[in-house]
Image (spheres, rainbow, N blue to C red):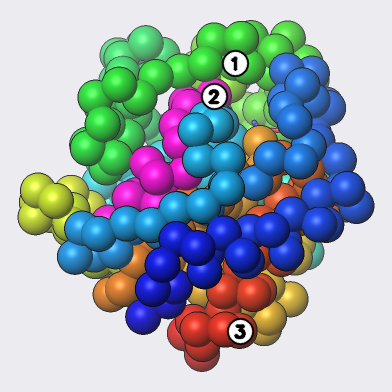
Amino acid sequence: MPCQTNEELEELVSIAREVTKDGKTADYIPALGEADQNDLSVAIYHVENTCMSAGDIEKSFTLQSISKVLTLALVLMDHGESFVFDRVGMEPTGDPFNSIVKLETHENQRPLNPMINAGALAVSNMIKGTDKDEKLSRFLAFTKELTFNKDIKVCHEIASSEFENAWLNRSLCYFMKKDGIIDGDVEDLIDLYSKQCAVQMHSLDLAKIGAVFALDGKHPQTEKQIIPKDIARICKTFMVTCGMYNASGEFAIKVGIPAKSGVSGGIMGIVPYHFGIGIFGPSLDQKGNSIAGIKLLHLLSEKYELSIF
Ligand code: GLN
């Protein structure tokens, strides 16, 4: 059982915090660039409903790419595996998360996996709903159920900042529209995706979502099976193979737990049947992962032997 006390966790946070100066905040979404690069927080939510936390725990942040795990779970529940995986693949890419290259060169033009932007945009396009607002409200309701927090909402400033600058994501969409991978209005999809990425929460909320996955989709507090076990397993497997972008292989070796990061500096980690981890550290490494967040996960994994392998 890791960290008996918050003090133990605080100590690891202060060691990891030292590397925040070696990274930088994301600025291609201008509003994300305003985050304080030295921030670092961690929460651990145990499946027995105890929690511990350390660092700048009062700071909130947006999900960004972490939302891709949740939309994947939602569309798998909406449509089933064969519908979803006819439109998005299961293979890691080795390319940066927003790369367009493989859309052109991959044999059947499907995005390679749902954790890269192309795949995640295709997934958001599949969320059931009559329009983008209904799709977003279904996604928000799902997130509220997972966090057991009815106050979760979209940060509109960050959503607009992304929407106004999402030229590459628009390009990915038009590319996929040409090949029939997505349908409908591209601007509506970019609006939905920017808002899904801008859903805001605290490390503790994120740790709790991790705990739901740690329990194979069952909520530790309500004991409701929110996500079917098979779908939770698929999501966790994608997190292992593609969750840390093109750093997933090294992360699997050095840390060895299912995890998903976002360019806000959030990371959700899962230690199956034990706990979920929520981290926020907006200073990013070159691949777009929280530099101190990864350091902290290394420290935790080494000290408490968390690797699933
Ligand atoms: N909203 C971000 C984008 O599409 C998410 C990317 C990320 O977190 N890696 O660029």
For the residues labelled 1 and 2, the Cα–Cα distance comes to 5 Å
- Label 2 CB-ligand 1 distance < 8 A: yes
Between 86 and 16, the one lying in front of the other is 16
Quarter of the image that includes the N terminus: bottom left
Secondary structure under badge 1?
helix
The residue that mark 3 highlights is 302
The quarter holding residue 113 reads bottom right
- Label 3 CB-ligand 1 distance < 8 A: no
Relative to 160, residue 23 above or below: below
Between 246 and 4, the one lying in front of the other is 4
Q: Amino acid at mark 1?
A: Ala
Which callout, 2 or 3, points to the residue nearer the camera?
A: 3
Quadrant location, ligand no. 1: top right
The magenta-colored residue range is: 198-212
Which callout, 1 or 3, points to the residue nearer the camera?
A: 3
Secondary structure under badge 3?
helix
Q: Do the numbered discs 1 and 2 sit on residues whose CB atoms are within 8 Å?
A: yes
The residue that mark 2 highlights is 198
Image location of residue 79, percent across then percent down: 28, 44
